[in-house]
Amino acid sequence: MSDLLILATDLRERSDESLTTLLHRRNLAGSPKDFFDLAQSLFANKSIQSALTKLAAAEALALQWLVAPMPDAAQPAENELVALANLGLIHNSKGTWTCYESVAQLAEPMLRNKVIAVSGPAAVEAPVRISETAATMGLAAIAAFETQQAITELVLDVEQHPIRQIGKTGIGVGDIKRLAAHLRRSTVAVRGFYTFALQLRLIELVSERWWLSSHAQDFLASSMLERWSMLANQWVSSLGEVGARQLRTLLAQQPGDLAETLRAVFPLADVAVDDQLSLLMEQAQGIGFCVSGQPTLLLVRCLEGQTSVAEDLLQPHLPQLQHSLIVQADLSLIAPGPLDTATELILRKFANIEQVSVASTYRLSALSLSHGLECGLTADQIRTVLTDLSAKALPQPVEYLLREAENRFGRLVIASGTGTERSILRSTDGILLTEILNDSRLRPYAFFALSAGSLASRFEPDVVYFGLRDFGYLPVRVDNQGAVLSPLRAASWSLGISPVATDPMITLIKDLRAADARVGAQPDDHDLTRQIQLAMKNKAQLSVTLTDRTGAEVEFKILPTALANGRLRGLDKRADIERTLPLDRIVRVAIG
């Protein structure tokens, strides 16, 4: 039986949870059609190389024992071999562990004559003694607060801007720079935040555009400490079970520089191939797991599985939540401290944030208030929120802006059209439509007049909506019944997809299961041909169920040899004859 067939069979028999873990750890690229496609993807050199560089020392030593054993090498523990099997790198055949040939070809040069040090198991139970001062915990808390705040801003940015895919899995430079200027952080730091968001599955790629997932909604609805816990647990899980255990062991033996300790935990990490260690260090500093390169007690407790204890250590040092706001006549809003989640989410519907920090600054504008009205708020509700937070009457300029936004709301609407008129702009203000038609900045949208009260464009409504807002116009999108669409709903309206994307890994696994069931129940011609060709390529036995002349189902087990002219030929070893089976009578096939 070939390696491809062995791995495909193994994948098919795994639980959904096991498959999800595998796919996330192996960073699967592409969209396999079935389990054989998935197995081929996992055998790709790039996928194997990435998996090898992320192996913990104990896992690397176990793989070395299989492909390039050192003199007097002892057999590794069973759980380390199981960990390699869970990663799709080795398999167990009749009680014997074997490395897949594709994996062995890449792993053997990396592991040949390489001395890999693994800490003794006795140190696992030793207490980790890392002294913590108030100053250290204070610095860790500031980093943790700023990182969870930055990722929250990233989520809100994805909700409010159409962020397209650039390259295979990239984010555009323009989107990176916009968020970097907003957060007053470097573009390198922002790319790190996007990596964290992807690992947490807060954003997902759908139709070449990044969308918020259901996890993002949970993240936004969580408290500051809960968000930090999500980041901390993700960092620990990214080490893998064996890697986390080894890091705990090394810290118990000799606490020291975290970067050096991580290099000992992941001896095959190669910066030229995968900058894994730099990413881990950057994230560790961002969530308070290390200060000036030295591990903190937060890291130790999370490695021990005591995240709640780490929360208790962190909480006294975090900025205290506030429920107050200073509303100024220049339309700026100053929060003297971080706001509670519920207040923050309401405020962000109608105010743009200018400075992200412990004390944040927001600003009201015609565009921001229009966004709030689109989200379902009324001018009176916005006024009540601001009055409640400021505990005093609003300045006159704020009142004027509220009344103006309310009066102008809905004056320009965008509806969905058909054909070359994909977007229809309507307004009772003919002067406004003429201004849009003659605005040189809007020429790329190719607006043309339909009637005295409407314009049309060949672009989708969401594209036109964001384009008009970029130049100061206040459009509102409506559905076929004329009801106003909130920005989150409208962003997906023209594409006909859910505004909150589901986890693509879960969707992929469902598709793989469905394809597998279809092949076994009622395959189409493509499914049949593919399964037969795979069986021929791998010289695997094929179970074929077909109907005879009476309509009854008959099953044959054959070794397929040829497929041509609508017929399948194969050797039936049980009967010791060659059979020729018509494809149009085959109802089911199964490899193995």
Image (tube, rainbow, N blue to C red):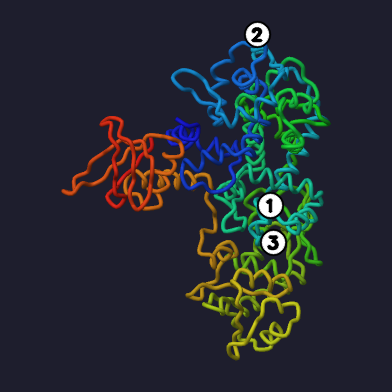
Residue 573 in the figure: left or right of residue 435: left
Q: Identify which residue, 226 or 27, lies in the foreground.
A: 27
- The CA distance from mark 3 to mark 1 is 39 Å
Q: Earlier in the sequence, mark 2 or mark 3?
A: 2
Instruction: Assign a secondary structure to mark 3.
Output: helix
Label 2 crowd (10 A; few <14 / some 14-19 / many >=20): few
Q: Which residue is mark 3?
A: 386
Q: Is residue 192 above or below residue 460?
A: above
Residue 14 in the figure: left or right of residue 380: left
Label 1 crowd (10 A; few <14 / some 14-19 / many >=20): few
- The CA distance from mark 2 to mark 1 is 46 Å
Q: Which residue is mark 1?
A: 170
Q: Which residue is mark 2?
A: 72
Q: Position of residue 59 (x, y in %)?
A: 62, 23
Looking at the image, is mark 3 or mark 1 nearer the viewer? 1
In the image, farthest residue toward the front:
577
